[in-house]
Each structure stands twice: as C-alpha cells, then as structure tokens.
Amino acid sequence: MGSNEDLQQTIVGIRTGLASWKALEPHLISWMYEQGRSNLGFEGIPGQRGPWQLWSRQTNNPLLRSLFQGLALDRPIAESIHTQIDSLQDWVDLAMTLQLTQKGLVNWFEQQPYDSKWGTQQAIATFLTFAVLWGELSASIGREAMVNVNNRESLSQGSFQMALQTLRSFTQKTYFPMYGGVFALLSGRYLQDALTYLDESLRQAEGTQEKARMLTLLGYSQRAMGQLEQALAFHQQALEIAQAAADTTCEIANLNHISRTYLAQRRYEDAIHDSQRALILARQHGDRAGEANALTNLGYAQILTAQQLERLAPEASEVSIGYLKEGLRLSEQLGDRQSQALCCNSLGIAYGLLEQHTEAIPYLQQGLQAAQRSGDLYLQGLNWAYLAESYFRLGDRIQAMIAALLGLYGLSEIQAPEQRQPKGLLDILRGQLGTEAFQEALRQCRASLLPLIGVDGFDHVVELLAIAS
C-alpha cells in the first residue's frame, strides 16, 4: 500500500474514530449507576456486568460492536475481530476510540473526591484492562487467519506499542501500586491473562524506569500465585533497572519484595539481609511506606528464623514483635491500608506461632479490615486462613470453619497456593466431626457466608471441598 493511501486511510480513520467516541462519550460511566459501581468488567456474570454490553449498543461501528459484545460475553478477542479489520482505516478508528475511552475513564475515576480509594482502584483497573486488551489485540492481529488486512505485521506492532504506551502512562501515576492492590481488580484466569500479556509487552521494552515499575507489579503478582522463582527473577531485574535509573522508591520496593519472596521460600537469612538493606535505604530517603514494609519483613523473618531454630520464646521474640508494631504504626500514620494489612497479618501470624491466639485474633481481624478496604484479595485470604487457625486452636469450631471457608474461597479466586492451608484445616475438622456432623456445621455456616460471597460463591467453595451440599 502506498504512503498516500496510508495517509488517506489514517485521516479517515481518525475522523471515524472521533465520531465513534462522540457517540460513546455520553454513556461512558452510565453503566456504573445501573450496576451499583461494578468493576470494569473482567469479572461477574457474562453479559451482565461491566460497561461492554451497554457500549456495544451505542456504536454503529461493526468492529467496535463485535469487540464490546465479545468482551461482555467473555469471548477471546480473536473470535470477536475475526475478519473485521480489513484496512489501516479500521485499525486507526479502533485505536482512536479505545484510547479516548481509556483516557475518559481514567480522568473520571481520578476526580472522585468522595471515594478516592475506589476511584484510584478503578483507574488502576482501567490501565490494566486496556493494556491487556491491546496486548491481546496485538497477538490476535498477528495471527494470519484472524484478519484480512495485508499489513498485518505493522498493525500488530502498532497494537503492541499501544499496550506499552498504556503501561508507561500507568507507571507515572502517583497511585501506581508498588506494594499491591492488583488482586482487587483481576482474579482467576483474567489475572493470569494480564500477567501473560504484560510479561510479553515488557520483554520487548527497553530497560527504563517504567519497565522497572511494571516488573515490580508482575513480580508480586506472581508471588501471590505461588510462582516464586518467576517472582524473584522479575524483582531482581526490576531492582537492577531501578538502581541504574536512580529510582530509589522502586529500588526499596523491590528489596522489600525480594525479602518477602525469600520468606515464602524459607530463606530467612536472605530475607533478613534484604529487609535490612531496604530499611536503611528507606530511612535515608524518607520513604515511610518502604520503611513500614521493611520493618514488617524484618520482624516477620526474625520470628520465622527463631521458630526454625526452635527458639521461639516470647522474650526472645520481643524485638521482632517490636519491629512489626513499629511498621504498623507507620503504615497507620500514612493511611496505607495495604501496608497495614501486611503488618497486621504478620503480627497475627507471629502471635499464632507463639501460641498466643487470643492476642493474634484482633490483629488478624484488623488486617482483614485493612485488606478489604485496600481491595487486596491475597491478604484478605491469608488473614481469613490464619484467623481460622487461631479460632481452631481456641476450640471455636464454627468460627474456624467460617474463616477457613472464606480463606479457601478468596485464595482459590487468585489461584494462590496458600489455599491448601484452610482446605487442610477443613479436612481436619471433617475428620474430627465426621461427615454427617461436618455437613450440618456447613449448613450452619451458610447464613454467615452468603452476605460475603453469595450463593454462587458458597456453592463454589463447597465444590472445592468435594462435599455435596
């Protein structure tokens, strides 16, 4: 195709894209009022949640309509755009509309003064959603059977560049989640899809500050899903890039994440070493969120080291508990719910390891509330799991069962390997009670669970236990 024809198609594509956006703009956020502020649409009942179905009804563009309907019905993008992109004009039209839609949503979410936390979460969800969308479009267009256009390779690369541009814009936001938050936005296979497409995009990006920050997000996401070696590789690469780019905040975050990953691998001395490095750097540079996380990791690592060496006496753990409490105090001063959840979870676990379950429960409950407010499904699940352990140790079987079921549900949603912990406790309870009594107890728990996870969630968690309800 000649350059003049390319130019003409680009101009026409811009015009039609602006027209598509003009038709869509009045309906940009109306879906939220209809659905009670649901998330962006990577969850829920196909065809009933998110903006996609509503948006599909507002456009006369067959490509956009097909794409939005496919997203609403949870179909692969390749099926939705099959033979729909016939020219450069089609792609430019699509790119203009999607980019303006993304910017419109982000701007609106950022301007929510009465619920800024929710607005921030949804802005993050928007960036991730559109980055994944462009990544999947790039892969779909690149498959020869998917589209008719001749310059398929250049349009696939153009889609890839749109994914990278979206990620770069995201990393520059003050609310970029250095320590968590993604699990409120994507769950199940959608989280895995996000990791896959973001990973592919970053493999081809240059070693920049933006890349370091996205690798940070990928790393802690992989850790939550149990991919510890992959998580460590991401964080170590991010650490090197952050150091070269003099991005100290990102450097401290990755030292903390590496420490946390070492904890998961039971490499406690390595975890202590990197948490101490993070603590020194954070104090030198006034990074209080980094300091709070470093204190938490240091105290937690020392507790686990003492347990491993069978020296877990209360007096020997006093210094470690002190680090955890100092981290909690700092995170509370900052209003950092993510760090609060992590600190409370670590304190609850520490007191549990000390067999002081009465002291553990209030911290785990506080951590659960902080995790719910920050929207971190991983920490919510962990707090439920350890609450279940403490209730069980104190002889409260019903509360232990409720907490274990909620922990199993939450951790299974993000495919976290820690789901084995509450499931194992439920198996112990079933063995103690017998099958019939256990099923009766399960029916008693149902009323407490339904307001939190609904009928579908309850049925799902029962299915995970392989129990006929």
Image (cartoon, rainbow, N blue to C red):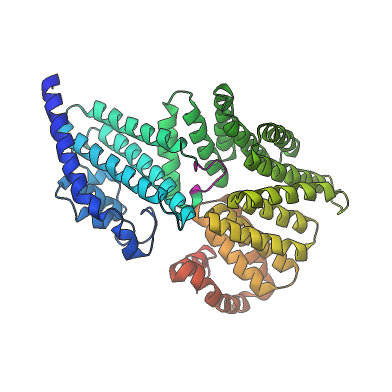
Horizontally, residue 424 falls left or right of residue 50, namely: right
Horizontally, residue 9 falls left or right of residue 367, namely: left
Q: Is residue 2 visible?
A: no
Q: Which range of residues does the magenta coloring cover? A: 175-182
Q: Is residue 358 visible?
A: yes
Residue 200 is situated, as x and y percent measured from the top left of the image, at 41, 33
The quadrant in which the N terminus is found is top left
Answer whether residue 178 is magenta in the image.
yes
- Determine the residue positioned at 41% across, 35% down: 169
Q: Residue furthest front?
A: 113
Horizontally, residue 327 falls left or right of residue 96, namely: right
* Camera-side residue of 317 and 124: 124
- Determine the residue positioned at 46% across, 36% down: 171
Horizontally, residue 457 falls left or right of residue 370, namely: left
User: For residue 83, which quarter of the picture?
Assistant: top left
Magenta stretch prevailing secondary structure: loop
